Image (cartoon, grey):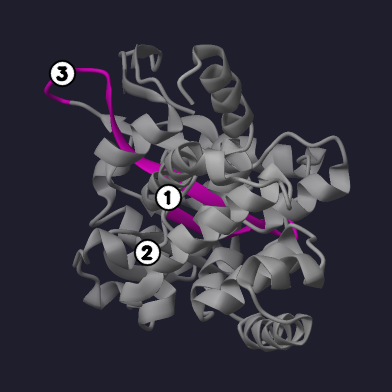
Amino acid sequence: MSDGTATTDLDIRLEKHRTELTGYCYRMLGSSFEAEDAVQDTLVRAWRAFDTFEGRSSLRSWLYRIATNVCLDMLTAGNKRARPMDLSASTPLAQAALSPRPDHTWLEPMPDARVLPTVEDPAEAAVAKESVRLAFMAALQQLPPKQRVVLILREVLAWRASEVAELLDTSVASVNSALQRARSTLAEREDKGAGAAVSDPLDEEQQKLLERYVAAFEGYDMTALTALLHEDAIMTMPPFDLWLTGHADIAGFMTTIGAACAGSRLLPVQVNGVPGFAQYKPDPEAGGFAPWAIQVLEISDGRLTGFHFYLDTKRWFPLFGVPLHLDVDGQPDQVEEGA
């Protein structure tokens, strides 16, 4: 590995796999930042061990083996990342309180560009997007780690059972058994929000829905906003464990505890395979608008079924590569390198 040209060539070959490996590790770990750490660890291990790579499998398969081992090591603590509605019942507005939980509690959002490689097949692209949506990601976190590996490789990445068995040093029968158990677990969770369906690409009706949402949210028009919501729509705000459901409680929260969001500005982002927005609140101290939340929207049957606000701006806005501040006209005046 002392030859500079060889090193550069290897770096390029390894780097080509970064996005798909990040997607794999993200599905395994449920954390944007842990996924990127896992991929970096994977590529460093591969670089250091490349002299021992005998080529009995493809470079891609070898990298997935390393990534799998890295993720399984990281999951030995047993932490299962979740959404607020996976942990408790919804809170009536009258009892609403903002109680944060540690970062490692929560399933984290991820920019599409970091986990979804460019593919030409629309059906393949749709499957990839579906596999990083929050409901599916939350279901994955409930699986034992090795079942998670099998389900992702077989159902999402379309590996053959024999390939998965080789990666895990096990039998095809064991892989098929693990897949069956994983499918059963996911089927039991289908009633917990997995039904959101967004067209890929967005159709004209959904595009208009998003335009109406932006107008209603930026205008803080609760009548217009609730008209866009499914009657059982859910609103969450990690790192707070509070979650609300239904028009009355959502609108009531936004006009009381959440009233400071009035006058916000929204910039579109692509997040977890669905439309989303970077939200900026008015900044009375510096003027203009300060970062507040990454919003993830879920759409089904022409209505919003869920909108999720991720509030840790110091982490999310650089990750999504969106401006760190907007001027008084709502235009970017500082941009962070990122997705």
Residue tagged by mark 3?
A: 286
Secondary structure at badge 1 equals helix
Q: Measure the C-alpha gap from mark 3 to mark 1.
A: 38 Å
**Magenta region: which residues?**
284-308
Amino acid carrying mark 2 in the image: Met
In the image, is residue 6 part of the stretch drawn in magenta?
no
Query: Which disc, if any, is residue 74?
Result: 2
Residue at 63% from the left image edge and 44% from the top image edge? 20
Residue at 69% from the left image edge and 63% from the top image edge? 153
Q: Quadrant of residue 207?
A: top right
Q: Quadrant of residue 286?
A: top left
Q: Measure the C-alpha gap from mark 3 to mark 2.
A: 41 Å
Q: Is residue 176 above or below residue 107?
A: below
Horizontal and vertical percent position of residue 158: 80, 60
Q: Quadrant of residue 85?
A: bottom left
Disc 1 to disc 2: CB gap under 8 Å: yes
Q: Is residue 297 left or right of residue 125?
A: left
In the image, is residue 302 part of the stretch drawn in magenta?
yes
Observer able to see residue 264: no
Q: Residues within 10 Å of mark 1 (few under 14, many from 20)?
A: many
Q: Is residue 6 above or below residue 118?
A: above
Q: Is residue 264 left or right of residue 145?
A: left
Depth check, front residue: 58 or 146: 58
Residue tagged by mark 1?
A: 38
Mark 3 vs 1, N-terminal side:
1
Q: Measure the C-alpha gap from mark 1 to mark 2.
A: 8 Å
